[in-house]
Image (cartoon, rainbow, N blue to C red):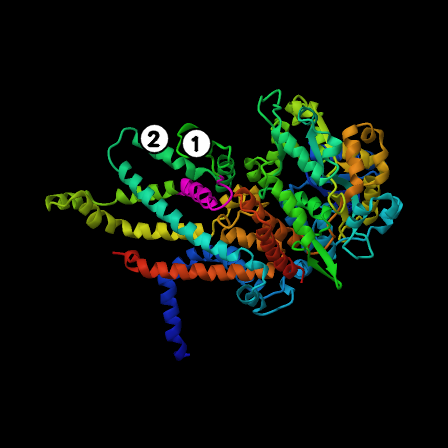
Amino acid sequence: MVKKALSSLLVLASLAFAQKTLEVWIMPNSPQPAEDFKALVAPFEKAHGVEVKVTVLDWGVAWTKITTAATSGVGPDLTQLGTTWVGAISAMGVLEPVDDVLKALGGEKAYLPAVWRTTRLEGARQATAVPWFSELRAFYYRTDALKAAGVNPAEMFASWQGFEAGLAKLKASSFRDPETKAPLAPLCTPGKNSWDVLHNAAPWIWGAGGEIVRQAGGRWQSALNGPESLEGLYFFLSLAQKGYVPAESLEKNTAQIEADFQAGKCAVFASGPWMVQRAQVPEAKGGFAERPAAKNLGVAPYPAGPKGRYTFFGGSNLALFNFSKNKPLAKELLKYLGSPEAQVRYAQMAGMLPGLRSAWGEPSFQQNPLLRTFIQAAQFGRTYPSLAGWGGVENLAVQHIGMAWDLVAQGRLTREALKDLMDKASVAINQALR
Amino acid sequence: MGGLEAPLLLMRTFWRKYGLAYLFIAPAFLGMLLVHYGPMVQGVYMGFLDLRLQTLRLYLQAPFVGLENYREILLNPESTFRAGFLYAVRTTLLYALVVNTLNLSLGLLVAHLLNRPLFLRGLWRSLILLPWVVPSYVVGLLWGFMWLKEGVINHLLVDVLGLLPQKPHWLIGPLTFVAIVLPTVWRSWPFVMVTYLAALQTVPQELYEAAKVDGATPWQRFRFVTWPMLRPVTAVLLLYGLLGTMYSFNIVYMMFGHGAGYPGEWGDLLMTNLFRNTFGMWNFGLGAAASTLYMLLSLGLILFWYRVFREDLRAR
């Protein structure tokens, strides 16, 4: 009898315990991903008497783990989703609508249109993801190198013509990095071996009035081979062929290019807000604060193209699986993580920008002139359409733009060759979107 | 009743004779069934399904589309699988040919050199074996750094030895082929060498002595004594090598942006192509159909191999 009562008690206790645990999957967003996240949710845990269990997934395996969870129905309550993944996972029908959470956080007007677009599958009425943090691309430049070359950053980053003229002056400049004593490459950019091949090319395509995919007659189709897209891509790629980008850059990946800039090898390069944070962190802790690159750092938005100024806008959202057994509590956690205070705190930890627009007024962002430029650049931010098949589109675009980078490296890029490649890319993308 | 006695007796005799053997084989067979044949049959079946992101939750209940996926790959000129597919086939075949030729010749040559009294022979053997213990993804990662334009290989070739007038791009353009072949050979030839060395040590010395007495030259001794004894082991090494190169993935995957980038016309192999088209596009039905086609291709290759080496594989 006593045994029976005890075992019932145990079952009840374990049930109670199970109800008070929330499981969250995140990616390595900050230097100490698990510890930082636990510190972030500690006030929530205390207020609700709940334990938030965090599992950190590497970006390389995250997609597979999340889709496996979606397919099997076994997984966490909440998961982080890259903004370009929201469409695909939403289309699988495994995410709980979160319109009530977004409403509590201020609704559509609380977010930039680019961010709001990432809360759901393109065209869907119900939102399935809550913006967590944003990243966008801007140009980092060496103030000392530009000054020595007689380049005015305001002019250089005003237009494409100004940008190219600035690069030409930097190329002719005799300026050397005070530490390495070597001349700086005018522009560093990875070629085909980086994960963000399309993110790097997109602002140029948009700036020329082009698009990656376009909706025509109710169907999405590739627009990569349109005249404007080709113009933008050609301008960007030809900067390398004209010798403004060192040949060795084209084989490197994003991390290697970032390391090159930190080491004083480049005058200009494009990256996200995390470099601002790294410039303040000593080398022993993964930053580059001691380097001349950190002491002479400037930020400028992408230059305006003939059809406008754009930059790639990405980041991550949080989504609630509909198989979660703790939906009300999980929604409370979503509201907490989406709140201005938690957004600011986590963005600072991750070196990103908050997803919530009101959080951008926080003094720590506004008082840092470099981050302030990022916030100003955000108005030019643009996201990819949140399509279910976006993964395939991006994959094919990356493959064919990668082939164009190969031509650049061999000095064989022509407008005709680029058109030929983008025609092939478009055939494949249209097939994938069918 | 009498009619059943004969078959029962036969079964009993069979059981007495082979029962224990089947009992011992059973766990291995069950294991194979579970982890090998089961998933293989499932994979082949997936090739007949419209299994994509939108239907992934249905898994094996996804809509059955018969041979549609095969038609898509083989007959639709606009199929996403066609993007770079022919390049991948050409590069894989060349890769298999060059890697195995280099592996077998280098392995045989060095095995011969080490199969004689040599100072510190054991040490040389161990040192040569070292690359073989390096995991292939590490090989891809390390060589990826070494092949960079400003990497150690170009430094050696241009700055130190002065063999080339300028530093070439190894990871872009046709030279990519060299960049994927050399690390593969670097990692795999030691295994070939050790296998040949073991085989060489089983050749009876009397045969060489007899050949010497008959006045055979060193080449004739190799041609008529050593080589016939090495043919069976060569057959196994060739099969192992061919399948290994046909299914090669890690080195290329790691060398070009850890799978983020496109290795290019001269770097993309069948497996990296298949991976990109399946997991990048999230079309598992098509991916499974393509895998089945590759499996049939490999099976054809094995049958051809078996025809060539059939005699060598018979127990003598």
Q: State left or right for residue B94 relative to residue A128.
A: left
| Residue situated in front as seen by the camera: A212 or B104 | A212
- Which residue does the image show at 59% across and 57% down from the upper left? A424
Segment tinted magenta in the rendering: B169-188
Q: Residue A244's quadrant in the figure?
A: top right
Who comes first in sequence, dot 1 or dot 2? 2
Residue identifier under label 1? B158
Q: State left or right for residue B275 relative to residue A76.
A: left
* Percent position of residue B88, x then y: 49, 54
Disc 1 to disc 2, C-alpha distance? 32 Å
* Percent position of residue A403, x then y: 56, 49
Q: Is residue B76 above or below residue B257?
A: below
Name the element at disc 2: helix
Name the element at disc 1: helix
Q: State left or right for residue A176 relative to residue B5.
A: right
Q: What label does residue B274 carry, if any?
A: none
Q: Is residue A184 visible?
A: yes
Numbered disc 1: what chain?
B
* Percent position of residue A362, x then y: 85, 32
Residue B302 is a magenta residue: no
* Number of marks: 2
Numbered disc 2: what chain?
B
- Which residue does the image show at 88% across and 48% down from the upper left? A103
Q: Quadrant of the C terminus of chain A?
A: bottom right
Majority secondary structure in the magenta region: helix
Q: Is residue A17 visible?
A: no
Q: Which residue type does callout 2 highlight? A: Leu
Label 1 neighbour load within 10 Å: few <14, some 14-19, many 20+: some
Q: Nearer the viewer, mark 1 or mark 2?
A: 1
Q: What label does residue B123 carry, if any?
A: 2
